Structures are given as C-alpha cells and as structure tokens.
C-alpha cells in the first residue's frame, strides 16, 4: 500500500459514521464503573494510602475508558506502576488486587 493509499484509507476510516442499533445489556457489558477510588491510591505506585503493602490495578480501580483498548492500556499502565512501586521494597508483604 502506498503512502497516498494509506492516507486515503485513514481518511475514510476517520470519517466513518455509524449508529448503534441496540445493546446486549449490563450482563454483556465490556466495562462497568466502580472499584477502589483513585483518591485512595498513590498515582505513582497504585499502593493504598490507608493500607501499606496493598496495591490495586486494572478494573479493580474506579477508572473507565472507552472501548478500543483503553481499558487494556489502563490495566498495563497501572500494573507497571505497581510493579515499579514494589522495586526496592524488601520484607514487606504485598497484595495486588486486580480483575
């Protein structure tokens, strides 16, 4: 595919409009709201402010993103932050809550 063809395909996809015609309901929902509030966690390490050694990541945290990989990105990013938060902590029992 040439650069010109690729740009044309991108333009067509960016302008694509559609209207959903229904819903599968809550039972089939991809993402739901709720979880541990972000104010309760360190944004750098995902460690609970009130319970040292307790970490929450992914959908266990009250963060909701659009469909299309945003929630996967949040899961990976929050997991990486928690993993970096573990670095250098020796002799502390840790629990990670994830979904």
Image: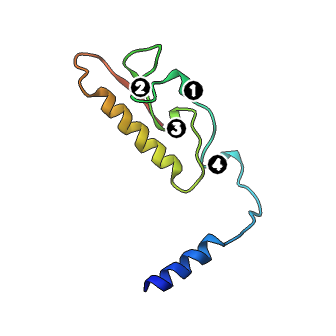
Q: Residue at x 58, y 53 (%)?
A: 67
Name which residue lies at 55% across and 79% down: 9
Relative height, residue 59 to residue 29 (above, below):
above
**Residue position marked by numbered label 1 in the rendering:** 37
When asked about the image quadrant of residue 56, the answer is top left
- Residue 36 in view: no
x 55%, y 81%: residue: 8
Observer-nearest of 71 and 10: 10
Judged from the image, the secondary structure of the residue bearing numbered disc 1 is: loop
Whether label 1 touches label 3, CB < 8 Å: no
User: Which residue has dot 4 on it?
Assistant: 29
Q: Which of labels 4 and 3 is toward the front?
A: 3
Find the distance from the CA under tag 1 to the CA under tag 4. Answer: 21 Å
Q: Nearer the viewer, residue 59 or 87?
A: 87
Residue 55 image label: 2
Q: How is the image coloured?
A: rainbow
The N terminus: image quadrant: bottom left
């Amino acid at each position: 595919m040439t650069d010109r063809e690729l740009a044309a395909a991108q333009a067509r996809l960016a302008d694509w409009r559609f209207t959903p015609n229904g819903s599968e309901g809550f039972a089939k929902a991809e993402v739901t709201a709720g979880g541990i509030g972000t104010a309760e966690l360190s944004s750098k390490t995902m460690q609970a402010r009130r319970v040292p050694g307790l970490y929450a990541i992914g959908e266990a945290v009250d963060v909701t993103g659009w469909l299309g990989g945003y929630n996967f990105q949040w899961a990976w990013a929050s997991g990486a932050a928690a993993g970096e938060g573990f670095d250098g902590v020796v002799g502390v029992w840790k629990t990670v809550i994830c979904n």
